[in-house]
Image (cartoon, rainbow, N blue to C red):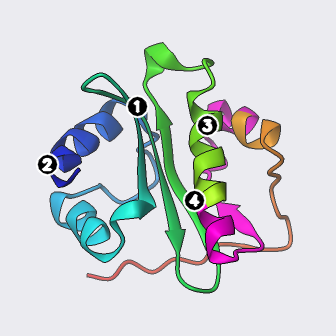
Amino acid sequence: MEAELPAVLEFWRVAAENDSRPVDTDDAIRALYRRDPAALILAVDGSEIVGTIIAGWDGWRCHLYRLAVAPQRRRAGIGGRLVAAAEERFRSFGGTRVDAMVLDGNTVAHGIWAARGYHPQGEWSRWVKPLG
């Protein structure tokens, strides 16, 4: 799968929400892959990437990032299957709660998260600091 990492980056440029977030880089995706190759879950049809999700487990909490489905393949269940695969990964580690990073303005994505039982958590705010 390491050979597919450049294709994943290109897929995200087309299929993922890219506003209000740091730019994905080759170094960053390779670092993810070196640390935890199973965290990057791909949906593939033949040789074509049609969906992705990152299922990050830090040993304490479960985090979901970069759920993306090819625009022409949306509403076909791919996103739901990716979320289910990520949740199963977390259950295998003994995870008890999962959060998903979803931009407030990405209203297209809100429906899939709600359909899978996720909801915004009003009592928390995400604080960020760029390292660089």
Question: Relative to residue 33, is residue 42 depicted above or below?
Answer: above
Q: Which mark is residue 81?
A: 3
**Which residue position is annotated with label 2?**
3
- Residue 91 on the magenta segment: yes
> Residue at horizontal 43%, vertical 62%?
39
Query: In the structure shown, which secondary structural element does the residue marked by tag 1 occupy?
Result: helix
Kindly identify the amino acid type of the residue bearing the numbered disc 4. Leu
Q: Earlier in the sequence, mark 2 or mark 4?
A: 2
On-image quarter of the C terminus: bottom left
**Residue bearing the label numbered 4:** 64
Q: CA distance from mark 2 to mark 4?
A: 23 Å
Residue at 45%, 13% in the rendered image:
72
Label pair 1/3, CB-CB below 8 angstroms: no
**10 Å crowding of disc 3: few (<14), some (14-19), many (20+):** few
Q: Nearer the viewer, mark 1 or mark 3?
A: 3
- Does the CB distance between marks 4 and 1 fall below 8 Å? no
Q: In this rendering, does residue 101 appear at all? A: no
Disc with the residue nearer the chain's start (2 vs 1): 2
Measuring from the top left, give residue 89's x and y in whole percent: 58, 62
Query: Which is nearer the N-term, disc 4 or disc 3?
Result: 4
* Residue numbers of the magenta segment: 89-111
Name above or below for residue 126 compared with residue 115.
below
Image check: 70 left or right of 101?
left
How far apart are labels 2 and 3 at the CA level?
A: 23 Å
Q: Nearer the viewer, mark 4 or mark 3?
A: 3
